[in-house]
Amino acid sequence: MARRPLPRILSNGGAQLARSRELARTAADSATDVLHPLITITRGLRRLAAAGRRRVAETPKEKRGALLFLVSSVLLVVALLPYGPLLAAVTLMAAAAWKGRDRTPAAADGPDESQTERLKALYEALVPYFSTAEDPEPLYAHGGAWDKAFPTYAFDGGGRISHLVVRYPAYFTDGEAEARARIEHLLAAKSGRGREYHFTWDEEDNQLTVSVLLPLPVDIAAQRFVTTPGETVLGFTDPTQVRRTLPLTYGEQRRDVPPVIWRTGLRSTEPHLLALGQPGSGTSTLLRSIALQALQHGDVVIVDGGGTGEYACLTGRDGVLAVECGLTGVLASLEWAATETERRLIAANRAHQAGHPPPDDTKRPLWILVDRPTAFTHLAAADDRKDPLSLLQVPLRHGRPANVTVVVADQLDSADALTDAVRQHTRARVVLGPATADQVESVLGAPPYTTPVDQVPPGRGYARLGTGPVHRLQVPATPNPYDDATSDAHCQAVLDLLPPRTTPADGETVPDPDPTRSEPEPVEPETEPVPEPEPVPEPEPVKRERVPVLTEPEPVPVQTEPTESKPVPVLTKPSKTS
């Protein structure tokens, strides 16, 4: 069967629409050019009318009569003069045209004197890197034309460069990381320190685009994020790096901010996380933020190696299995975590072999948050005990199928003391605080796409999930609510997210320390009620004929008035030979 051709409107409808839009745009531009004098005169008449109204409004009431008489006299004289109305109309149109002209000041064609000096200095600094003696027509030369090397530039309100496009010769080795790093360091130093720059290298066109990144928001407090189970918000980043946004609350306002989301669970490729940073960089804040999000759908075990009570607010809460600060408790908790991981694996494996779904007790996520574990390594070595980091090997290796997630946070100086299991199985990485580009690359496995700065707020750093790109990161403010140095708003935000206190399993209550109160009556322990014995009926007179004959000739004694406490004696069954 032959195929019919598509209708003409469907085959080339897009071209017709584009042509129609182009014709409409051309007609609108032509009409604007033709009607431009009329538009100018109309704008001028409107401005003259507004000025007249203001003049009348500003005139005192006692002088408005004289003003009205003066205007009426002028109009009468103009009307009586030969060609007076025509001359008045021409004068009014000329005044309206003058008043309605476009008075917007023309933008400057080029940079001012200070901006020109800055661009010249930057050009001269790049000459040793982008020029060679064998180049017959060098693009960069001392005293050369800087406008050919910088086709596009922009400055901020302070006179510093905010956007710059740099052209460089084709023989520059832009494929080498060291050559790129030298140029980026020079541009960041000459354009202004204390800011983060983004460098985009276009090898095909031999151009480098330099952009200044805006600082990430630091006023985002801890709150309930719109996520699904298995998603954890590590922080927030630039809008150009991610495609998703989260609605957040800023006091009474709401904004959409792009997050850095870490996915955990059975199908996660990065089931565990490692966070490193300098002291005071915000690694404990990151762990508190993760703990508050994990408690919505799972259980948490916390190991505090700092010993400063950063996680005291979580002690005794629903879902918090333990908050350990001592070596003995840490070893016991981590041993239990390893045993629990093995138990979950065995239970899930048996269910899979039997063709049944996994048990419910293996589906609930278990989070193991370890802060500064290397502090216990030295204590364990001094006491000749097991290293706590060695107990993390089982949860790290087999935690993903068992719904067990491990988060380790430590300082950059102690990164070498971490075990191989921690470094190999923590594919999600975070670096917080001031760090050099080499330190960031050694932890994340890839260099940052911006220039690190020396002074950063707490919780500021970089994150990389597996083999993905490197993101700028700002952790939401999640301080210790028991710390007096934090703001009341942030402390209250954390307290609102804490789960309620755990009720003891035996239901016992804490005794009241106030001796003036009357003590409650002691409650006797509940025991199983013992059934009362049935009342013994009064014995009827014994009939002699119903008493069987015993083998022995002696008569059987019968008790006529038995006591109430003793049961009625039971006669034995006589033998058949009587």
Image: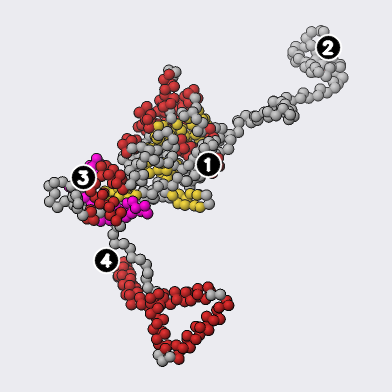
Q: For mark 3, does the 10 Å Cα neighbourhood hold few (<14), some (14 to 19), or many (20 or more) residues?
A: some
394 sits left or right of 207 in the view: right
Is residue 149 in sight in this rendering?
yes
Q: Nearer the viewer, residue 25 or 56?
A: 56
Q: For mark 1, does the 10 Å Cα neighbourhood hold few (<14), some (14 to 19), or many (20 or more) residues?
A: few
| SS state under label 3 | loop
Position of residue 299 relative to residue 36, above or below, is: above
- Is the residue under label 3 in contact with that under label 2 (CB below 8 Å)? no
For marks 1 and 2, the one nearer the N-term is 1
Disc ID at residue 487: 1
Disc ID at residue 129: 3
| SS state under label 2 | loop
**Nearest to viewer (mark 1 / mark 4):** 1
For marks 4 and 2, the one nearer the N-term is 4
Looking at the rendering, in which quadrant would you find the C terminus?
A: top right
Please report the residue visible at 40 percent of the width from the left and 28 percent of the height from the top: 393
82 sits left or right of 55 in the view: left
221 sits left or right of 516 in the view: left
Q: Nearer the viewer, residue 36 or 228?
A: 36
| SS state under label 4 | loop
Please report the residue visible at 29 percent of the width from the left and 56 percent of the height from the top: 113
Residue 391: image location, x then y, percent: 42, 26
For marks 1 and 4, the one nearer the N-term is 4
Mark 2 — residue? 557
For marks 2 and 3, the one nearer the N-term is 3
- Is the residue under label 2 in contact with that under label 4 (CB below 8 Å)? no
**Nearest to viewer (mark 4 / mark 3):** 3
What is the C-alpha distance between the residues marked 1 and 4? 77 Å
Residue 366: image location, x then y, percent: 47, 34
